[in-house]
Image (tube, grey):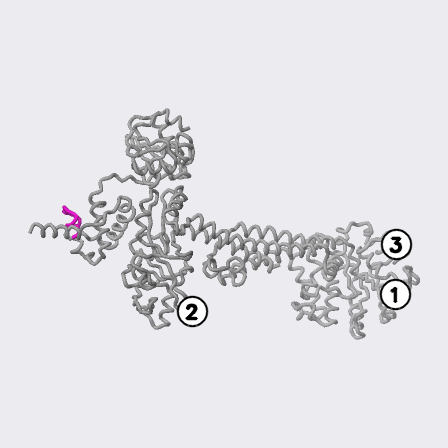
């Protein structure tokens, strides 16, 4: 009896089991797909008071979205559950600069290098934009107090990330507008890959950056 | 004179319009397109490799699509585009269609021209495609769309991947292309190289490479254009030179008469100036207008083929949207008009300064 | 009012059109220059009109030594004082009758009203009002002749020169021309006609006959 229960459980879970998707696939494919489906077809879905993913699936099956193929339902479920309802990673807005803005350290026009824009925001609300982490750090060392947050862009994904969470690679063959740079990566794996592919020398975190390092890059 | 201007302007319009179109066309292409070859020929990709490709750091998006011709009649083939209606597609035209219309399994979106053809074959609400094995597949016509702004999609049919596979005889997860977008463009060549490594039989083309390919082909024919242009210019100069060296006896006589009845040299030249002015301006405007109509309305029959030739680029495929580079307009004007003036005024001046008593003879 | 003093005209190759000509013509005279082709009649007209300059000697017209006037002023002089009727009419075929008649005055910047007045007058005088807009090349020989004469009159010239005016005309048209000539004589104009047409040889309204031969005056009859 327990055996059959066990088998039944297995069955049930396989019904709800999804192929094990990697983070990359989820972020790049599944979530966007689910999001699109949700926005186009299932916006009326009531998302309150759901405690498990299975409940969500049931609710979907009870709505007009039940007619979707299993592939779509899966994407929808994953998106809603993991991204919309339970994603707690902070999302930073893209760093946008105008055509007139210049880097306070080197004076270059920022709009020319959109991939490299990095920003310091202070508690008094002032924001400063730079054409790379190197210049940002130069400014930071001169004005280290009252900093609210420091944001930069991940090399591979071009998404805005928090500098404190980032992994920086130095000594690589990728040059920023100011020459040698601290190349920001979103996580350790990306940093490792980058180090190998672009012949980087070191991976360091934000706290470890010293003025000497900055000078050494010049 | 007018003929000359027309020819030159046609060439310029054509070339600038086409190069402009090429740039805009390639702008919306995905960063990398991957296709498979089998035994040296175009084969099919397996959609499943998309997940593997997504693992590559730097790839922001990857999706498979099906783009293949479906022979309708001897000389007309439709382009079947098989997509997932919820996937983001790079091509703005198709993306827009998917945004606007709901694409369900078993139905399709067709272009206006396709709809008309189907209507002629008595198919109004649906169409029966013939599978490779001879059996029929019925697909509903959901909506038709207009291709005025995208003539290269004149025979486009958009449908789901499953339907496309069914019609074309592709297996469960086969597709014709995989489109890959790269977040940081600096990484594109590296990623392309990686892809080539992973899939040695695949053809991996980056946007840059595709652009170059188009440009190369275009430039070859640009060479022809340059030659034609030089010839036209040369002819023009010869005509000018000829005029400079002398005037017809009729014109000499006329100037003589004018002098005899009391016109001074400056009066004669003044009149010649007006004459030259009107002719130059008129033929310029006429030449340019005719060239404009010829290229952008008639789509440059005959001459257009100088540029474009063969499968990949055909004038009919280009929308030849009016794209005028004022620089060229200016150039032609500055080149032709003053020279023409000189050609008229200088000999007139030479004759006018002679003694007019020859008129009396 | 017209004086040629010691005028010689030599062309390239040692050809002398005129040799040491002395001539004086009074205002209002109707003079016929007789002589075969090449005797120098056309050359005299040309010199008086300022269309060419003498190799030696002076040409004085209405007090002005036109043989020394630069081309620019000669042209203005012609426009203001001289009307020429050419042997071959020398009308501009692609222009209309009105345009041809008004042609001499275009550079003169006269007010439009004045131009129109003169034009109308001439069109009436020569009975070609209805042909005003027609292209000259569509007219008959006689009509073209009248246009040519009208053109010579539009600038109210003091002097009218006619070079072989009847050379290309049949007898009827030639006689018509002579009639017109009679009317031209009034208004105190000096008229000089170079011709070898015998129809002119015995006219009572001609004041003076001058015969030329090989560039010299051999006879001067009043």
Q: Mark 3 lies on which chain?
A: C
Percent across and percent down for residue A54 are: 15, 50
Q: Considering only vertical position in the picture, is A96 above or below B68?
A: above
| Residue C31 in the figure: left or right of residue B232 | right
Helix, strand or loop at label 3? It is strand
Give the residue pinned by disc 3: C7
Look at the image and give the residue range highlighted in magenta.
A46-57
Indicate yes or no whether the magenta region holds residue C108: no
| Residue B236 in the figure: left or right of residue B258 | left
Q: Which residue corresponds to the image point at 42% horizontal and 60% vertical from the top-left?
A: B151
Report the residue that reaches farthest toward the bottom: C172
- Inter-mark Cα distance, 1 to 3: 18 Å
Percent across and percent down for residue C170 are: 79, 74
Give the residue pinned by disc 1: C34
Percent across and percent down for residue C10 are: 87, 55
Numbered tag placed on residue A53 in the rendering: none
Q: Which residue corresponds to the image point at 84% horizontal and 66% vertical from the top-left?
A: C195
């Amino acid at each position: 009896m327990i055996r059959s229960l066990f088998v039944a459980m297995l069955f049930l879970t396989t019904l709800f089991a999804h192929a094990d998707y990697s983070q990359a696939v989820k972020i790049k494919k599944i979530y966007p797909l689910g999001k699109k489906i949700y926005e186009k077809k299932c916006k009326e879905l009531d998302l309150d008071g759901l405690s498990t993913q299975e409940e969500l699936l049931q609710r979907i099956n009870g709505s007009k979205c039940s007619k979707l193929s299993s592939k779509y339902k899966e994407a929808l479920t994953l998106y809603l559950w993991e991204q919309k309802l339970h994603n707690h990673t902070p999302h930073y807005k893209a760093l946008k600069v105008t055509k007139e803005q210049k880097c306070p350290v080197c004076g270059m026009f920022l709009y020319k290098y959109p991939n490299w824009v990095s920003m310091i925001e202070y508690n008094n609300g002032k924001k400063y934009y730079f054409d790379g982490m190197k210049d940002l750090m130069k400014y930071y060392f001169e004005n280290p107090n009252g900093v609210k947050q420091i944001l930069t862009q991940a090399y591979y994904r071009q998404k805005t990330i928090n500098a404190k969470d980032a992994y920086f690679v130095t000594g690589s063959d990728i040059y920023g507008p100011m020459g040698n740079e601290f190349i920001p990566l979103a996580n350790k794996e990306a940093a490792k890959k980058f180090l190998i592919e672009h012949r980087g020398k070191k991976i360091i975190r934000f706290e470890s950056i010293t003025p000497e390092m900055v000078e050494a890059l010049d | 004179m007018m003929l000359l201007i027309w020819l030159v302007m046609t060439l310029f319009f054509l070339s600038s319009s086409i190069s402009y179109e090429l740039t805009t066309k390639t702008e919306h292409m995905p960063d990398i397109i991957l296709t498979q070859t089998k035994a040296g020929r175009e084969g099919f990709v397996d959609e499943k490799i998309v997940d593997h490709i997504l693992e590559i750091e730097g790839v922001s998006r990857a999706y498979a699509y099906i783009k293949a011709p479906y022979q309708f009649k001897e000389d007309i083939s439709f382009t079947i585009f098989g997509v997932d209606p919820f996937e983001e597609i790079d091509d703005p035209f198709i993306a827009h269609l998917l945004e606007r219309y709901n694409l369900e399994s078993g139905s399709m979106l067709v272009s206006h021209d396709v709809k008309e053809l189907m209507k002629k074959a008595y198919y109004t609400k649906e169409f029966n495609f013939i599978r490779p094995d001879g059996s029929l597949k019925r697909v509903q016509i959901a909506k038709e769309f207009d291709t005025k702004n995208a003539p290269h999609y004149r025979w486009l049919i958009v449908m789901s991947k499953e339907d496309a596979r069914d019609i074309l005889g592709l297996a469960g997860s086969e597709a014709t292309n995989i489109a890959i977008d790269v977040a940081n463009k600096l990484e594109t060549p590296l990623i392309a190289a990686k892809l080539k490594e992973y899939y040695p039989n695949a053809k991996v083309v980056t946007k840059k490479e595709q652009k170059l390919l188009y440009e190369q082909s275009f430039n070859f024919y640009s060479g022809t254009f340059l030659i034609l242009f030089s010839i036209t210019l040369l002819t023009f100069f010869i005509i000018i030179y000829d005029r400079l060296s002398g005037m017809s006896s009729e014109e000499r006589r006329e100037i003589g008469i004018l002098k005899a009845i009391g016109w001074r040299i400056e009066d004669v030249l003044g009149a010649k100036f007006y004459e030259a002015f009107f002719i130059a301006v008129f033929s310029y405007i006429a030449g340019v207008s005719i060239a404009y109509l010829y290229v952008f309305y008639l789509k440059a029959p005959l001459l257009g083929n100088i540029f474009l030739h063969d499968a990949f680029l055909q004038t009919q495929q280009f929308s030849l949207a009016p794209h005028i580079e004022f620089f060229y307009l200016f150039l032609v004007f500055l080149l032709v008009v003053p020279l023409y003036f000189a050609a008229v005024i200088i000999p007139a001046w030479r004759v006018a300064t002679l003694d007019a008593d020859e008129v009396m003879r | 009012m017209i004086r040629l003093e010691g005028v010689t005209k030599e062309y390239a190759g040692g050809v002398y059109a005129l040799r040491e000509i002395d001539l004086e013509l009074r205002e209002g005279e109707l003079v016929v220059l007789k002589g075969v082709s090449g005797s120098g009649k056309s050359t005299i007209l040309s010199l008086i009109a300022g269309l060419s300059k003498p190799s030696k000697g002076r040409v004085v017209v209405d007090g002005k030594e036109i043989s020394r006037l630069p081309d620019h002023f000669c042209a203005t002089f012609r426009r203001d004082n001289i009307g020429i009727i050419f042997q071959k009419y020398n009308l501009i075929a692609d222009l209309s009758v009105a345009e041809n008649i008004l042609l001499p005055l275009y550079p003169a910047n006269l007010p439009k009203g004045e131009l129109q007045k003169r034009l109308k007058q001439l069109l009436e005088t020569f009975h070609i009002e209805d042909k005003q807009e027609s292209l000259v090349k569509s007219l008959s020989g006689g009509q073209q002749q009248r246009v040519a004469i009208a053109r010579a009159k539009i600038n109210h010239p003091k002097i009218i020169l006619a070079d072989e005016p009847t050379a290309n005309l049949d007898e009827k048209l030639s006689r018509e021309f002579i009639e017109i000539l009679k009317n031209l004589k009034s208004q105190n104009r000096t008229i000089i006609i170079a011709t070898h047409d015998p129809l002119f040889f015995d006219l009572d309204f001609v004041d003076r006959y001058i015969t030329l031969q090989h560039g010299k005056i051999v006879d001067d009859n009043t």
